[in-house]
Image (tube, rainbow, N blue to C red):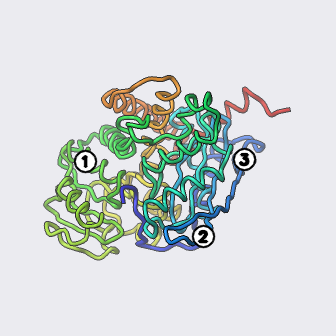
Amino acid sequence: MSNNQEFVVEKTTKQESLLENVKSQFSKAADIMQLDEGLRKILSINNNEIVVNFPVKMDDGNIRTFRGFRVQHNNALGPYKGGLRYHENLDMDTSRALATWMTYKTSLARLPFGGAKGGVQIDPKEYSKSELERITRRFTYAMGDNIGPEYDIPAPDVNTTAQTMAWIADTFASTKSPDERSRIHHVVTGKPVSAGGLEGRDRATGYGVVVSLKRWAEYRGLSLNGMSFILQGYGKVGYWAAHYLEKYGARMVAVQDESGSVYNADGIQVEELRNYSRNNQNKIIGYDRAESIENDQFFALKCDICIPAAMGNQITEHNAYTIDAKVIAEGANGPVNNIADSILQERKVDIIPDILCNSGGVIASYFEWLQNRNGEIWEIDEVLEKLENMISNSFKRVLTRSQEHDTDWRTAAYIEATSRIADAYEQSGIFP
């Protein structure tokens, strides 16, 4: 797989779902900033929740029906923006949680977007490429005008790729008149470069994780050079984070993916492991320059930096006490549940929250959207420079809010993001 991969180290209860996590995070920030009760109610619900059921003909000629979701949380700041994932465990509650996170992520980055999320409830490994294409195209058609370049702009997420986005863009365009087609290329972002995509979009989320870590190290008076890190997930987020950390002199000592966990205290070469994984069905297990360890030992490994870059609820109250790192950089959405968050704060482990740490992807998506909208071509160096500046500025704003309210960085990030949305409602008012 080229995207983030799922595996469960510790299972959490239904009460500790991603949706409950994000609700609690928002409520804590709203209480501290004394958010207007009316606005609190608005942000506690979703604007739109869409479920589509659609048929697709399989390679063997049989017809199967599939279920897709799209949750549009809030668009006070601009069009809805958020990824589409293909996963067998995707449901409405997961989509609600991820859409809500996107609202605060785009606001924190000061982008002119709201938040949305969704996808199709499938395990893509069970389908051929031609079947995935038909599923994608039929899902796009079923969504109809619930997506659009100035209304709701999807992007890749777990188990979806640039190819997926190209199929969506082509299908969406095919439903429009010829004179419209040249003006709607930005209906999705994360497309292949040859199909209007942005140079550097593939590495943007992982690069953003590293930018956040650079700012963290500077704030703590440290250097990334010589630091050790462990990485959960060796898809596009994890790989690119490792790639750039290695360039800054950090040492990768352990990696975990859906196939297992490998460890070498002396270091694991990033490109070497990637090449091995590509030749091993995208699995790291069996890599002979590191020892295999049990999955439940992974988060207890001694390191400077821990990067969960896979799925949500991976660090819980069951393993938070074992964390032996200076900082957790959340490359995934919601990898640390709220109970674990409190435990880690008590233990003085820094946490760079997801809505800041992994915002590089949506920032780069904004660049691609602008590029398509304005008919421009952006070079990769320009993209990465602008990306670093935006994440660095977000980090500074979070630090300021944290000091102002004497609170943790996650809550400070929510306060900063929510304040911008509150300002938008105050200026525009509520119709009628």
Above/below status of 156 relative to 125? above
Q: Mark on residue 87?
A: none
- Classify mark 1: helix, strand or loop: helix
Q: Residue at x 37, y 54 (%)?
A: 328
Q: CA distance from mark 1 to mark 3?
A: 39 Å
Question: In this orientation, does residue 323 appear?
Answer: yes
Quadrant hosting residue 273:
bottom left
Residue that numbered label 3 is attached to: 47
Picture coordinates of residue 62, whole percent (x, y)? 57, 72
Provide the residue designation for mark 1. 243
CA gap between label 2 and label 3 equals 33 Å
Contact, mark 2 vs mark 3 (Cβ under 8 Å): no
User: Which quadrant of the figure contains the N terminus?
Assistant: bottom left
Secondary structure, mark 3, is loop
Quarter of the picture holding the C terminus:
top right
In the rendered structure, which amino acid carries the disc numbered 2? Ile
Callout 1 amino acid: His
For residue 63, the mark is 2
Q: Position of residue 248 (x, y in %)?
A: 21, 42
Measured along the vertical axis of the image, is residue 411 above or below residue 297?
above
Residue at 60% across / 70% down in the picture? 63
Asked if the residue under mark 1 is in contact with the one under mark 2, i.e. CB atoms within 8 Å, the reply is no
Decide if residue 22 is on the left or right side of residue 328. right
